[in-house]
Amino acid sequence: MEHTEIKRKFGLKSKIFMGLTAVSVIAGAAYAQGRDPAYQAARDNGAVGEQTDGYLGMVGNQSSAIEAMVSKNRALRRQVYTRTAKAQGISVERAAFFGGCKNIERTVPGEKYQAPDGSWKTRGSGAPQLDPSCP
């Protein structure tokens, strides 16, 4: 691969990532303002966590109330990822993946996240394990 092609590919990846970061920060801030206390409790007790695909996931079997909350959260995120994908000219799946990278990075110690191998991890004081494809 030539230097200019590498620069173009990584330049585009950076632009997409910056756009997704801005959208995810805006979406996250808007969602946090109206955050359901049940959502925060589920995060705090490890019932839910951030998945590598950009969506909230259940850690193990959970109540129907948590299932409904996760489903609602996933639908809201899908709307954001769809708008972002359209604006950036990428697939919804790619937008969601980049969102997942940011969501996992933003976890705090004690919260659950999905490692690249698919296993659930609890965030410690260090950085979480990110997929090597994350920007």
Image (tube, rainbow, N blue to C red):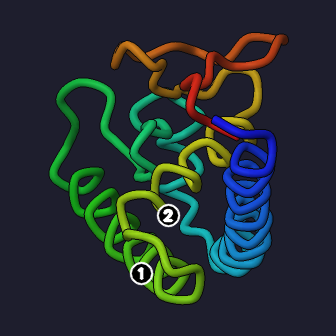
Q: Which residue does the numbered mark 1 point to in the structure image?
A: 82
Q: Give the residue type at disc 2.
A: Ala
Residue 15 percent location from the top left of the image: 77, 66
Q: Residue 95's mark?
A: 2
Residue at 71%, 59% in the rendered image: 17
Residue at 15%, 52% in the rendered image: 64
Give the class, few, some or many, for how many residues have Cα within 10 Å of label 1's Cα (few <14, many ≥20): some
Residue at 71%, 39% in the rendered image: 2
Question: Quadrant of the rendered structure where residue 82 is?
Answer: bottom left
Q: Give the residue type at disc 1.
A: Thr
Q: Residue 32's mark?
A: none
Residue 81 percent location from the top left of the image: 47, 73
Q: Where is the C terminus found, in terms of image quarters?
A: top right
Vertical order, 68 against 1 (above or below):
below
Residue 105 percent location from the top left of the image: 72, 36
2 and 1 marks in contact (CB < 8 Å): yes
Question: Quadrant of the rendered structure where residue 35 is?
Answer: bottom right
Residue 112 percent location from the top left of the image: 53, 26
Q: Which of the marked residues, 2 or 1, is nearer the chain's N terminus?
A: 1
Asked whether 17 or 70 is in front, the reply is 17
- Disc 2 to disc 1, C-alpha distance: 8 Å
Vertical order, 123 against 67 (above or below):
above
Left or right? Give the position of 76 relative to 84: left
Q: Where is the N terminus found, in terms of image quarters?
A: top right
> Outermost residue, front direction?
2
Left or right? Give the position of 41 relative to 127: left
